[in-house]
Image: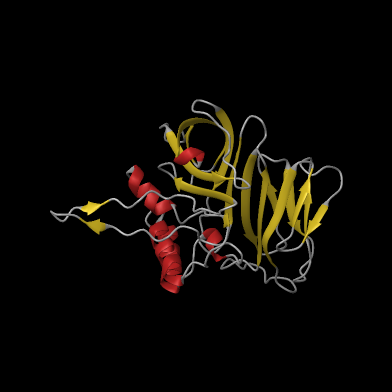
Amino acid sequence: MTPRARQVASAGLIALTIAVGCRSPERQAAKAARDTSQTAVTPEQKQLWQDAADKGDAPGLQRVPVVQDPVAQRTRSQVPGGQPKPGPPITIPPGTEHELRIVVYPDDPFESYTGRATVAQIEQNGDFIELQLPPGAAGKPRTLALLVRIDTNRLPVKVGEVVEVAYQLRRNPQVPNDVIAIRNSAGAGIGHVMQGANVLVQAVIPLFALNARQIDNQPTAPVQFTGAGVGPKPVDLTVGQTALVNGLTVRVLGSIVAPGKAPPGLTEGSPFTLNVMVWRVP
């Protein structure tokens, strides 16, 4: 798969923005799911993503309330000779406070990674960061490209600098299991985790020494943050709330719980979903 194809296929997979904007229409959600099906590595995965596209379901983080899609749908214009003209690059719109978006995945997008990466390229005044990862299972070099914005600021990194990064992509479009985080050597960075389960969700937020969990199956129950990142006292927040603790900001973007106990063996959909974001300002 070419870098351009990976960029188009992956742009809809993990996208997070807190900004003034409009909710993604269902047709954009269906297109994102259909694009994702083209990167599936098994027939079963491909069929699941195609079914999601037919239903108009958005993959990953686009389905959660309060998450907005800031990127206008790109179009391809025709030039003389009938050759398509490449669309404009994906950028962070003006006014965006926080964004963490994968625009280019490695060749195998389902091969998760947590560890060190080298900054290979910086564009768009620092918003676009291309990372070189260690070789994967196939033994080939891997590239991961991100759009990053933290509290209206760029993440201060330089070409050649080593940073920490973590990412994971769900294998089933109906079961959230998405992780993306980046942190520089000074500790500044941003992370976003969306996880689903048949029971109350307990999620690990990598790179920031933090855990988040749903503590009750009541719709108004808070989400609790624990770990060295917030110190000895747990922090309880409800959906939409934000707290600054020990220099680390935590926010609950979404928390969906099911009353009672989910039936055993349930695999389609996720009655419990947790969507959280953390950042440390540069």
Question: Compared with residue 203, is residue 157 higher up or lower down, i.e. above or below?
Answer: above
Nearer-the-camera pick, 123 or 209: 123
Nearer-the-camera pick, 96 or 239: 96
- Residue at point 58%, 32% (across, down): 163
Drawn side of residue 5 relative to residue 101, left or right: left
Observer able to see residue 103: yes
Where, quadrant-wise, is the C terminus in this rendering? top right
Q: Residue furthest front?
A: 94
Question: Compared with residue 9, is residue 111 higher up or lower down, i.e. above or below?
Answer: above
- Residue at point 63%, 29% (across, down): 185
Where, quadrant-wise, is the N terminus in this rendering? top left
Picture coordinates of residue 118, whole percent (x, y) = 51, 29
Drawn side of residue 30 relative to residue 275, left or right: left
- Residue at point 61%, 64% (across, down): 66
Question: Compared with residue 44, is residue 244 higher up or lower down, i.e. above or below?
Answer: above
Q: How is the image coloured?
A: secondary structure
